[in-house]
Image: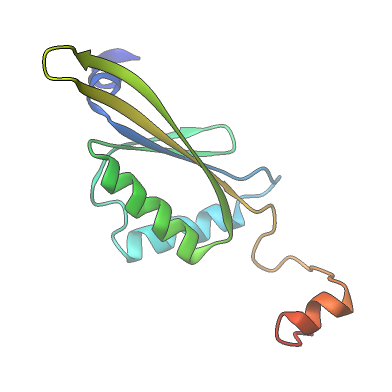
Amino acid sequence: MGINGAFIANTWRACVQVRQKVPHKRTFLYLEQLILKHNAHKDTINIREVKDGLDFYYSQRNHATKMVDFLGAVVPVTTKKSSELISTDIHTSTKSYKFTYSVELVPICKDDLVCIPIKMARSLGNIS
């Protein structure tokens, strides 16, 4: 983990885990370009590449929720939130949590051919 990894492990308060389980990474490449174009990574304190995706670390929960909102606005995703209690001050009843947002990109990429039933196509604005 090294010095930098230990530092990050002790300072982050929220993590956004972005995953997509596909053999190619066209959507991730597109997503990386959008993140850079819109400066959506500006509050990130660390980014780590992992199997099937990326982890974004933040010092504040609201920065992580802004990233989750951005991802949901630009690509179809499902999101799960979890929290872990990391400390409690019994004198002030103050609790400190770490939050993890698991964001899964749909396994459909740009330029993929998708067949949907006629009834569903009509309900989605009569798309072809």
* 59 versus 39 height, above or below: above
Q: Specify the quadrant that holds the C terminus.
A: bottom right
Q: In this view, does 60 lie to the left or right of 83?
A: left
Q: Specify the quadrant that holds the N terminus.
A: top left
Q: Pinpoint residue 111: horizontal percent, then vertical percent.
A: 69, 69
Q: Which residue is drawn at 24% across and 19% down?
A: 10
**Residue toward you, 12 or 81:** 81
Q: Is residue 4 left or right of residue 66?
A: left
Q: Pinpoint residue 9: horizontal percent, then vertical percent.
A: 30, 20
What is the basis of the colouring in this image?
rainbow
The furthest residue to the bottom: 126
Q: Is residue 105 left or right of residue 118?
A: left
Picture quadrant where residue 122 is located: bottom right
Q: Which residue is drawn at 22% across and 20% down?
A: 7
Q: Is residue 112 left or right of residue 48?
A: right
* 123 versus 18 height, above or below: below
Q: Residue at x 27, y 47 (%)?
A: 62
Picture quadrant where residue 58 is located: top left
**Residue toward you, 118 or 108:** 118
Q: Pinpoint residue 51: horizontal percent, then vertical percent.
A: 57, 32
The furthest residue to the right: 118
